[in-house]
Structure formats: structure tokens, C-alpha cells
Amino acid sequence: MAAPMIAEWSWFVALAFGVSFIKCLLLNAYHSTDFEVHRNWLAVTHSLPVSQWYYESTSEWTLDYPPFFAWFEYGLSHVAKYFDKEMLVVQNLNYASPATVLFQRLSVIFTDLVFIYAVKECCKCCREDKGKDLLGKSSFILATLLLWNFGLLIVDHIHFQYNGFLFGVLLLSVARHFQKRHLEGALLFAVLLNLKHIYLYVAPAYGIFLLRCFCFTQNNADGSLQWRSFSPLRLVALGLIVLSTFAVSFGPFIVKGQLQQVISRLFPFKRGLCHAYWAPNIWALYNIADKALSILGVKLKLLDMSKFSKASMTGGLVQEFQHSVLPSVSPLITLICTLLSILPAVFSIWRRPNGARGFLRCMVICALGSFLFGWHVHEKAILMAILPLSLLAVESKEDARTFLILSTTGHFSLFPLLFTAQELPIKILLMLLFTIFSFSSLTKLFSKSGPLLNSVEVAYLLGLVPLELICEFVYPLTSWQHTLPFIPLLLTSVYCALGVLYSFIRLYLSVLTAPSTTGKAKSQ
Amino acid sequence: MENWSLVSVCVLLGLTTRWAVSFSSYSGAGKPPMFGDYEAQRHWQEVTYNLPVQEWYFNTTDNDLGYWGLDYPPLTAYHSLLCGHVAKLINPAWVELRTSRGFESAAHKLFMRTTVLFADILIYFPAVILYCIYLSDGSSKRKVATALCILLYPGLILIDYGHFQYNSVSLALTLWGIVGLGLGWNLLGALAFSLALNYKQMELYHSLPFFCFLLGKCIKQGLMGRGLLLLVKISLTVLVTFALCWWPFLSDPQLILQVLHRLFPVDRGLFEDKVANTWCSLNVLIKIKTLLSRDTQLLLSFALTLLSILPSSIKLLTKPTLWQFKLALVNSSLAFFLFSFQVHEKSILLPLLSVLSYSMLPLLLKDGLLLPYTVTSLAFLYLGVYLLSALDRSPEEELRLGSCALHLVFLQFTVSLVAMAGLSFTSVVLEPPARLPDLFPVLVSVFSFLHFLAMLLYFNLVQLTEPSSKKSQKKTN
């Protein structure tokens, strides 16, 4: 029999090509206001001088990403002018000619090359047994879970964003840490922070890890910190890298005295506790509790309804509002809650680092903690936890279990982003595709040690099916659709929040109860 | 991964690709007064819903046959009727007599696309899965790969979900017929194929192989005993199916004649448009369309078609095995396509892969489907090459139809890729010279024609030279 003719990485190329073709077919799909956001930024960076970028407000979608992303858009705009010059005119609000759509979509597909490269680097870091057939190899499973990730596909290529590119930088930085090229990893993360500041969510993990494992070159025999192995040189190198990156990014604006304006654009705290579509986090549950209590209170004549503000919490606008019964939540409180939630994990890797894998775990916890407790969290941020968790999922059964729960509920919570009838089959089909693949491949991978999920978890996940049927098919046909249109969103958020919270707790337990790797010198 | 999950993944990929292609424009979008095939289907829903059966195929005040008159057999009409009923439930304006002509809206497009998807899921996908599980060779992985290749075949996706048609229904029914015959469920096979014939008369291309295969099986079982019984049962099944489908028309021979007249428009000439068959290509050198009278043309095409399928049919009759059957199907459809009367380019919709996709380029360009075409063709080509090279192959398996056809196509692709790319590129980008305005479509047609002719010769060779005993034959019954 002829030897298998699979070249070393040809399966990877096939996967990458396959998903790229699907992305190309989605060119004509629905796109959200984010499309106009990015078109506006192309126009602003192309037509106006740098000093105006963060002051320009002709469009309501002002520039609210850090300077590197603005330069990225500037670079793109130079290619854009060959497609349709009109999209680069700032006044052309909501301009969406076919050439514009083509260009923007292709730019996302093209910049995904960064993501594809990063995935390849991550696959190289996989520990796997030799001699397994292709579909059972953990690198294959990981590549598919990342390249064909449902969340990325629908957020980037339908809804429209550049997350593939950004997550590519993040995953590449993680891969570099796995490969013990810490300075590169640090540089990449610094660049990433200046591309999209939401990655501050995971900055604590980076900071503590680099300090603990890079600046302190050795551990004691029992794995604890050896204070004398502190290397000032490394600290200085790190500091230089980070500071110089920020200097290049913010320098021009500091020089012009615009720093305050830039910061106010990047951190618009006026936006309200919850985004228009509630992210499935703690505050969603909090809001529900508040609403339930207030209704109960009114019914029991304990509270006076006239004292309540009329603002509907999910009216689709981003406003600040006050809670009726429970204490109001301010940005400061969310910050404190977030920090409290991630502190134990961060402390844990300080005491007992588990190398790059421990760092990755801490990173996922930081991302999830910030997601659960943060201010004005967008549900897309769940990807920041799901994607890195994929790397852990192919190596440990417990993590696989958590991954399945988190990814299924997290992806489901993204459904409200695509609300058009035309996209309904696509999102269901792609969700089924990803879910079936992830379940069956991970189950097969860890088949030796029994079933992956217990019956409660399976029941919870299966509950998503009737939830979807109710929210998308049954509810719109009832009369409540007009009076209480936000109920489906509410149900989705609350149901998924439970799953996300559960995954968070499970991850925490795995960190706190993990045995430390004793005797291994973490010298670089 | 478990097999069922692999199959599910393939099915989901097939469905996703189909629906994503459906986002694109359809035939005749925004092009009054005639629009395109999409409007034709909608019009048939209108006609079948509002008018009595007897008037469907006739030119009446309410039914103008000049505006997309029905020209498919009754089963298509019944399908349209069903869709018409559903349409009426959702929005009556879609099927209002006369006033709904040229109706276009996003919701309507969604509805029409959904009907295609529904038919696919119900009939086509199960047929493909069954075919791959039971009637294709190789390891389970290879079967799944075959299923994926068939499900992702761009030609069918583009025509059904882009241009807009229901080819998957008739193809699916034929496939059910093949599955039935292959598994020894002869009556089911006969029933399914009869239904296919009653859905689209194009399936006549496959009729001779079905006939010869079944007859061959009967002969093998002995015409004086069980064979005769089988023959009687099959004939009854076919007759009853036809009777049921044509029931409303059986009362009056005039009705039947009119329907036949609509199905086989011999007045329309040897060919229309640019199609990759003999007559169109021959016409480039000798203007036979004008040279010969219509009756001579009819006779000529009939004779040549018959001649070209005779060897294959006789061989199948004498040796009714599944492998022969498959080859005969290929040969018969190729022969009909190349030589018969009034062939449309869509008639080549058979699993003969990428050359087909290419020859439909002019048609797809007209519909603004260039992007999905490029993407799906490239994907298909790449996937096919990758899958086939990745799986183990024994020399014997190389002759199997699936890998054989693909092998041939890839061979020819490596040779003619440059030519094809060049022609595609020029037909999109350049303007043809004024004296020969149809230069590029004609070149595409002629090029494809030569490929089809070569394929016809090759497959006939393969079928006719098969040795009488092959150890890996499926059992004949």
C-alpha cells in the first residue's frame, strides 16, 4: 500500500483554505454598524491629519481604539483608495457601495493571515502522541477549534470586526511564551494593547507572569520564589520594550497635548453598566434580580412605582440608569469586583507558577473575571476567554470539559448579534458544525477516561435548543413581541450567564487545586 | 472522530455553502420585462395555484405561455402548486394572478431560497448519504470524503442556489433510483426514477441505462421464470407511477399531446445559446442550423444519439452489474448531451465535476455569480485534490468511477489550467472583437465540448473493455 501522502502541514493549509472560502462566501451577508464604524475610521485617518484623529466627530462612531489601530486603518486606507475613493470621504456617512463592502470584507479575510500564522505556532506547541490518525491529533483538533471558531466567524465575517487579526497577535504572543521567547511575547502584547485596549483584561496575567517567571530566573527546590535570582537586566529589558511601544504609540499625542482627549475617547465611561444586548455576566443576573425584586415589591405594595425611572434597560440605547431596588453599580465598583475576582488566581501563579500553561490558565481567568464583573462589557469579549482556553482544552480533560461548556454557551450568547432572517440558517448551521466537531473530537481525544460531561451539564447545554426555539421562533409569533421585545435577549443572557459563571468557578478550582510542578527549575 | 459526526460535519458544510451562496443574486434579478428562471418558478406557483390543472399547459387569457410557460412534466407543476400554497399563507401578493408578475422582495427571495433548501434536505442529502455509505467503495473515511465532494459540487450549488432552479430534486430522485437498483430494491429504484422522469424530462438522459440494467437483471434471472415476474412487477410500477403523475391529463389525449409539445419543443431548433455540445461546436465551422431543414436536424440528432449510446447499452444489457450501470449512466448522459436536440447547458448537471462548472461560466456571469463560482470551484478543486491525494489508493481502486473521473479531470486540469484561466480572465476582462461578439462564450463552449467528447470516448472504452470477471464486483440480483 502506498505510504500516506499527507505532507507535514498540508492538512493545516487545507483547513485554512477551507475556512477562507467560507469567509469569502459570506461577503454578501448582513453587516452591522461596525462596518460603518471602520469605514469612518478609514476616512478619518486617510483624509485628516493625525492631530485631528481623536477630535473628529462628524460621525457618531468616533475613534475609540488606541493609536496603533488608527495607523492600521491608515495603512488599509491606502489600499482602499483603489477600490472606491468615495468611502474615504468623511462626510459619506453610511456609504456602502459594493466595492466598499468587497474591500472591507477582503481586508478582514486578508488580515486573518496573522491569526492563521499564530494558530500554526500554537499547534507547534502542542504535546501529542505520535502515531495517531490525523483526525485524532490534538494539533489538528486545536487548529480546527481555532480556525473554524464559530464566534470569530460570525463576529468578524458577518457582524464585521477585525478580531481575527487581533487575536492572532494575542495567540502569537502566547505561543512565544510557550516557546520561551518571552521578550517577543511581551513586545507582541504591548503592541496588542496599543491596538485594542480591551486586552487590558488580561494584562495582570502577563504582568505577574513575566515578573515571576522571567525576571526571577530560578525557583527553589519546592517551586517557591527564589528572591535572590532576581535579574534587574531582564526587568529593564521588559520595561524598555513596554515603555518604548507605548511611547511610539502615544508619543505624537502627548507631544501635541492631546493625551486627555485620547484617554477620554478610549474609556467612555458614560456608556452604562450593560451594553444594549446584555452580555451574559454577573450584572445581567444583577439586573434581573433588581427587576424581579422591583416587580415583586410593587405587587406586594412594598414599593412605590412612581419612584422608578422609566428607562428600559434593554431599549437598545446605551444610557446610564439607576437600579430600583438593589444598590446602584458604578464603574469603580465594577473595577473593584473585577480585581477581587482575579486576585486569587494571580496570586496563585505568583506562588506556584506552572510555566506557560499556568500563565495561560491565569489569562483565561482574568479574561473571564473581567467579562463577568466589568463595566459595559460586550458579549463579544467572551472570545477572549474561549480562544485561549482552546489551547488548554486539547491537553487536559478537565479543561476540555470547561471549554465545551464555556464555548457552547458563549457562542450561543452571540446569537442575538445576527438577528436577520437571512442569517438565521447560517448561524444555526455554523453553530451546529462547531459544536458537533468540538464535542466529538474532544470526547474521542479523552475517551479513555470516561465521558466528558456529567448529566447535569449535558442537560443544561441541551436546554439551549428549546431556548433558541422559543426566542427565535415561538416568541416572535406571540403578542408579547410588541409589548416586551427584550424578553428573548433577557432569557438568553441569563441562561448563558449561568454557564459562564459555572465555567469561571471550575477554572478557578482547577487553578487553586493544581499541584505545583516541583523540582523543575524555571531557568530561561 | 465518530463516523456519524463526520457525516454530520459534511452535511453541515454542504448546507452552509448552499445557504451562503444563496445570498448572492438570482437569475434575472431586477431585469424586467422577462426577468429569469427565478421569476419562472414564481410564475409557475402563481399559475398552478390559481388555474385548474387542464389549463396549466395551454395558452389561455390567464396563462400566457410566452411568459415562462410550463415546460417541465407534471411533478414539477405539483411541486410548484405545493410551494404556491405555502406562499399564499405567508403573503398572497406573491402568487396573485397577473399582478404578481415580476414580484421581487427580500422576504420573497428568502422564501424561494428556503424552498430549495427544504427540498435539498428532504430528498437530496439523504440520497447522497445513502449512496456514499452503501454504493461507494473504500474505507469509511473515503466514503465520507466522497460524500463531502459530492455535497460540495459547485455546479449544482451555483445553479440551484445562485441562478435558481430545483435540479437537486430530479437528481436526488435519480440518485434514489441508483441506490435502489444498487441495493437490489428494484421496484423502489424503478419508482424513484419514474418520479425523476416526471419531474424533469432531462432525466431521459439516464433512462436507457436504467432500462437496460433492469431488463438485464430480468434476463439474468431467466425470462421464463422469476425474471418474467420481475419484469412484470417493474413494468407495473413504472406504469402506475406515470399514470398517477399524469392522472389529470389522462381524460383527454389533446391534453397529453399539448404537455408533450411543451416538454419537447422541437420547434426551437437544434440548439439555443452557447452550449458545449456537438451541434453548437459544429456550427462554428459549418452552419448546420441553417443548412439543414428542421426535420433533417431532428433525424440526424436522433440517429447520432442512438448510435452513440448503443454500444454502452448493449454491454449493460449483457452484463448488468453496478459498475457497468454507473459507467453506462455516464456514457448515456454524455451522449445525449453531446448529440441530442435542443440541449441546454444545465443538462450537463451530473457528477462530472469541474469541467461542468467551467462551461457554465458564461451563464453564471450573466447572473452576477462570478464570485461564488470562483470560490466554490477553487474550493472544490483544492479539496478534491487534497482529499484524493491524502487517502490511500490501490491501483485497482484507481479505476473506480469517483476517483477515475476526478483523476481525469485533475489531469486535464493541470494541463489546461492555464488555458482555462486565460479564457476565464479574458472573458471577464476583455471586450471581444466587434466582428465576433460571442467569441469568448463560443471558445468556452468549444473547449468544453472537446473535453466532453474525450470523456465520452474514454468512458465508453472503459465500459466496453471491462473483462467479464472482476473479483470485486458487487453482487448482481
Image (spheres, rainbow, N blue to C red):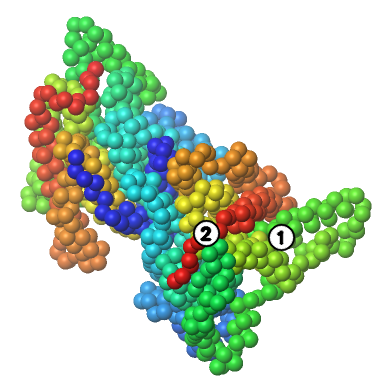
x and y percent of residue B380 in the render? 29, 50
Q: Is residue B360 above or below residue B176?
A: below
Question: Which residue corresponds to the image point at 72% horizontal and 55% vertical from the top-left?
Answer: A285
Q: Give coordinates of residue A414: x percent, y percent.
A: 57, 56
* Circle 2 residue: A517
Q: Left or right of B48: which side holds B333?
A: left
Nearer to me, B463 or A346: A346
Residue B201 badge: none
How far apart in space, not on screen, are marks 1 and 2 (Cα)? 37 Å
- The chain that hosts pointer 1 is A
Three-letter amino acid code at the position of disc 2: Thr
Residue situated furthest top in the rendering: B225
* Residue at the disc numbered 1: A283
Q: Nearer the viewer, residue B195 or B261?
A: B195
Instruction: Determine if residue B64 is in view.
Output: no
> Marks 1 and 2: CB-CB under 8 Å?
no
**Mark 1 neighbour class, 10 Å CA radius: few under 14, some 14 to 19, many 20 or more:** many
Q: Kindly report which numbered mark, 1 or 2, lies closer to the viewer in this rendering.
A: 2
Q: In the rendered structure, which amino acid carries the disc numbered 1?
A: Trp
Chain of the residue displaying label 2: A
Q: Earlier in the sequence, mark 1 or mark 2?
A: 1
> Residue B95 versus residue B403: which sits nearer the camera?
B403
Q: Quadrant of the N terminus of chain A?
A: top left
Judged from the image, the secondary structure of the residue bearing numbered disc 2 is loop
Residue at (10% x, 24% y) in the render: B468
